[in-house]
């Protein structure tokens, strides 16, 4: 205080402001840490700004205010509130333009999907369900998508947008395996998607998007994948398998349903779990895939996903380095469905490229290398398969050595 009187008497207010840190240190010496509070700098500094700014011109003040609104959300909000009080929009501009059914949905569609939007006003709440699908299509948060699924799963357009966006998040996000596990544990995504398949059985877009989302949720990483196995067990327990097969049978002419359905079946069969594979064979999954491939011979996506599904379901089971072969029930179901002929015919219609490589790999999985593989290989060749399709990389390396 003596220092302030002697040196800063003309500026006593600034002197007290400068001594606030010293007061804070003194308070820290006698008060517990839990009772400490930051010094009230804001009130003192705000009190002196009017005096300091009154000498500036109107142009300077406008420039400072505009810069503050551009850089500070708080300042911009304060300016907006004051502008509404000083110069409110006329009623015709509010109701006839800003809140019109023609303009407002286009504005809302540009905003991210958030729960607080319906609380803004009656017009926003009324148009919420109309604009939510377009908002969800761009959503990158899996938690937000699952929240929307839980709230609007009975709305077909919203359910379709959620499933397509959920599949997109998994396809473009790093660490997708951990996101799948989080959705399974926290959000209950598989159960919600299965519920949508059941409740929207006659809606083709929802069926196709739901199968794609289930396929993504079933998928896992290469190598041992305990989390992926748990997800597939949960999805099977939710009753997804019969619903997928029933949907594929109910919409045989829709290629999108058939393509995503084959993808979901192959993802469920991944991991070579005997109980799941046997359940798929008993439920008619192999016949559904073969029928899909026969009905859509000109659709590359259906042919590729169908070959991969057949190869994954019918491949030999491996455990601890031992080959257990193909289960007898699966072999009988594959034979009665004509799975091998469907794969060979699909490969013969392809002209090459990455799709042919993936489908020939699926054919090699189907033929196998254990007991009974020689008979399946002979049957494939008799049906018109090229010998190169049945050669593994190991066989090619042996030929190169010879």
Image: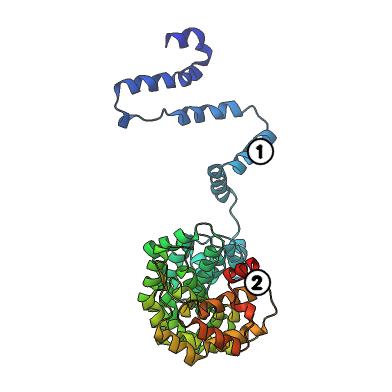
Where 88 falls versus 155 (above or below)?
above
Which residue in the structure is indicated by mark 1?
62
Name the residue at the top extreme.
Answer: 6
Which residue in the structure is indicated by mark 2?
354
Q: Quadrant of the N terminus?
A: top left
Q: Earlier in the sequence, mark 1 or mark 2?
A: 1
Q: Is residue 318 left or right of residue 378?
A: left
Q: Nearer the viewer, residue 185 or 101?
A: 185
Q: Residue at x 39, y 63 (%)?
A: 226
Q: Whole-percent x and y of residue 179?
A: 46, 60
Q: Nearer the viewer, mark 1 or mark 2?
A: 2
Q: Whole-percent x and y of residue 341?
A: 57, 89
The figure's colour scheme reads: rainbow
Q: Nearer the viewer, residue 294 or 272?
A: 272
Q: Is residue 238 visible?
A: no
State the SS at label 1: helix
Q: Nearer the viewer, residue 64 or 356?
A: 356
Q: Quadrant of the C terminus?
A: bottom right
Q: Whole-percent x and y of residue 374?
A: 51, 83
Q: Whole-percent x and y of residue 191?
A: 39, 72
Q: Nearer the viewer, residue 188 or 262?
A: 262
Q: Residue at x 62, y 78 (%)?
A: 389
Q: CA distance from mark 1 to mark 2?
A: 62 Å
């Amino acid at each position: 205080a003596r220092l302030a009187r002697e040196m800063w008497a003309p500026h006593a207010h600034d002197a007290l402001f400068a001594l606030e840190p010293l007061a804070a240190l003194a308070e820290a010496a006698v008060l517990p840490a839990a009772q400490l509070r930051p010094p009230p700098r804001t009130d003192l500094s705000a009190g002196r700004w009017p005096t300091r700014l009154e000498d500036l011109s109107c142009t300077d003040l406008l420039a400072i205010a505009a810069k503050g609104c551009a850089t500070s959300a708080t300042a911009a909000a304060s300016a907006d509130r004051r502008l509404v009080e000083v110069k409110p929009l006329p009623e015709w501009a509010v109701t006839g333009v800003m809140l019109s059914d023609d303009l407002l949905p286009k504005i809302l569609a540009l905003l991210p999907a958030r729960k607080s939007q319906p609380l803004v006003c009656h017009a926003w709440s009324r148009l919420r369900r109309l604009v939510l699908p377009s908002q969800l299509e761009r959503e990158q948060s899996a938690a937000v998508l699952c929240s929307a699924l839980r709230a609007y799963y009975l709305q077909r357009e919203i359910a379709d947008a959620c499933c397509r966006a959920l599949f997109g998040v998994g396809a473009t996000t790093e660490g997708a395996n951990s996101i799948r596990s989080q959705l399974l544990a926290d959000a209950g995504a598989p159960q919600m998607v299965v519920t949508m398949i059941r409740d929207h059985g006659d809606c083709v877009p929802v069926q196709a998007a739901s199968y794609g989302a289930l396929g993504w949720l079933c998928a896992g990483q290469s190598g041992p994948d305990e989390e992926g196995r748990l997800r597939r067990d949960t999805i099977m327990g939710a009753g997804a398998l019969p619903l997928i097969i029933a949907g594929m049978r109910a919409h045989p002419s829709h290629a999108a349903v058939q393509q995503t359905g084959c993808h979901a079946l192959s993802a469920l069969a991944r991991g070579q779990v005997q109980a799941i594979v046997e359940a798929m064979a008993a439920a008619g999954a192999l016949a559904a895939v073969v029928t899909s491939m026969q009905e859509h011979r000109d659709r590359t996506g259906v042919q590729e996903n169908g070959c991969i599904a057949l190869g994954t379901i019918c491949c030999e089971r491996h455990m601890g380095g031992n080959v257990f072969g193909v289960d007898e029930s699966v072999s009988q179901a594959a034979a009665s469905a004509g799975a091998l002929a469907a794969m060979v015919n699909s490969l013969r219609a392809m002209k090459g490229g990455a799709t042919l490589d993936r489908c020939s790999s699926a054919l090699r999985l189907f033929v196998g290398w254990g007991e009974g593989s020689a008979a399946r290989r002979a049957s494939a060749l008799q049906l018109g398969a090229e010998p190169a399709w049945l050669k593994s990389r190991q066989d090619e390396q042996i030929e190169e050595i010879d």
